[in-house]
Amino acid sequence: MKKYLINWVMFAALAVWSSYPALADTAANSAIGHSKAPIFSNKEKIVFNLETDFVDLWKHRAPANAEVPEEIKEFETPGRLTWEDRTGKHDLPVLVQLRGNTSQSELQCPFPKMTLNFEKDQATDERVSKGTLFDGLKSIGIGTHCGGKPGASVRFRRVWGGQSPHREALVYKVQELLSIPGYQASATTFSYIDRNTGKGPVEPQPSGFAVNRPMPAFFLENINTFVKYADGKEIRSADSRFKDTDKLYIFTSIVDAPRDARAAGLVIDPIDPKAIIRIMLFQALVGNYDWHLRISRDDSDDSGSLWNIKVVETDHKWIVFPYDYDLAAWVKLDNSPPELPSFDNNFYKPADISVVVAEFKEKRSDIEALVDDLANEDQSGARSIKEQIKSFYNALDRRFR
């Protein structure tokens, strides 16, 4: 037994050593789809102000897990985004839309997530975001506080009271640190003004919270920005219930990706198992189980092939990445023992698993440093997340010695 153990350790070490030439490529891949908009590197503490007709906006909430009527899907209301930074005062016209699935319910997020769309200046034909913190962006997401009243929503227990946005932004930062492609995020603060009253909007029941003070939030890239800067196209699940005519609905599984692509006249490389192992371990690290990714066609899970996972085709590759972490344990401060993924599919190889596990162990201190930044404003959140990190790495050590 000792002989085999030594051989396994040597094998794992060789696998890690042989991976170093590819580490630079891995880091570069994690930046695919990233815009150069200054908002994602900005270090100034800024309070952004958004004025719009919140009453009308909230009347156009999309139904969860159902086909969205066009009058809701396309609805957007005019607004103004203002702020002051080191370059001066800024006042931009925007169009405001709601986004999200179950989170749009009044019972889940009385104050739901939004998208801001930047129009073109008719005089110059330039996007109004040009030359500002949002330079190069046509649109950007806002991760809101969900609900201002202390507590949590029914059923999904989404965190209210302003604690969730910066915790979720932290998850996106850790995702980038672990060389997993995805959206850029930037924690910030927002004041909201209802155009009808000139005051902070009042959230519908069961909250009833008057949003009359600045609230934590975060800016988030979206799929349109990612696709633009990746110079690619979005690939959607073949088993999607509701389909748009302008998207390719061809994805069936990770293993069958090259075959799926060929059926649509595309040629892609096989998807690197290490990229998927990173995603699976990352989701376990942050305690997020609100996602699904079909690995092979014989998966027994009844879920769709993609849930809270995006696939983008670029340069003969399919880039796979996760998003949406408002139900993650890091956000909800759920200290339940982590559930490490099962790598029982032939798609995964021991050498690939060893390489990724080594990457995660190497980056632990950097992850904890990001959590320390959160502690400056959210000590209880940072403390809980640190405990969850410890539990994850203990489980990792037990599973992969």
Image (spheres, rainbow, N blue to C red):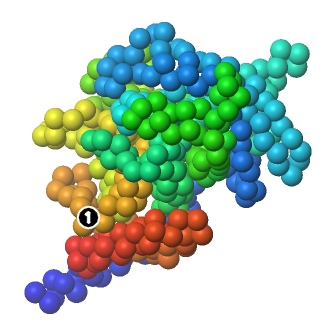
User: What residue is shown with label 1?
Assistant: 336
Position of residue 89 measured from the top left corner of the image (x, y, whole percent): 86, 41
Mark 1 falls on what kind of element? Answer: loop
- What's the residue at 36%, 21% (across, down)? 63
Using a 10 Å C-alpha cutoff, classify the residue at mark 1 as few (fewer than 14 neighbours), some (14 to 19) or many (20 or more): few
Residue 276 seen by the camera: no
Residue 102 picture location, percent across and down: 36, 32
In the figure, is residue 301 to the left or right of 68? left
Q: At label 1, which amino acid type do we have?
A: Ser
Q: Say which residue appears at 45% left-offset and 22% top-offset.
A: 61
Q: Does residue 266 appear in the picture of this structure?
A: yes
Residue situated in front as seen by the camera: 212 or 366: 212
Q: Is residue 237 above or below residue 45?
A: above
Decide: is 317 above or below 363: above
Q: State the residue lying farthest toward the left.
A: 1
> Viewer-proximal residue, 276 or 364?
364
> Which quadrant does the N terminus fall into?
bottom left
Q: Position of residue 117 (x, y in %)?
A: 65, 26
Residue drawn at (16%, 35%) of the image: 302
Relative to 335, is 136 above or below?
above
Residue lying at 71% horizontally and 29% vertically, measured from the top left? 198
Is 223 on the left or on the right of 238, as rendered? right
Question: Can you say whether 359 is above or below 209 in the image?
Answer: below
Quarter of the image where the C terminus is located:
bottom left
**Displayed quadrant of residue 210:** top right
Left or right: 343 as drawn, with respect to 65: left
> Within the image, what quadrant is residue 66 found in?
top left
Tell me how many marks there are: 1
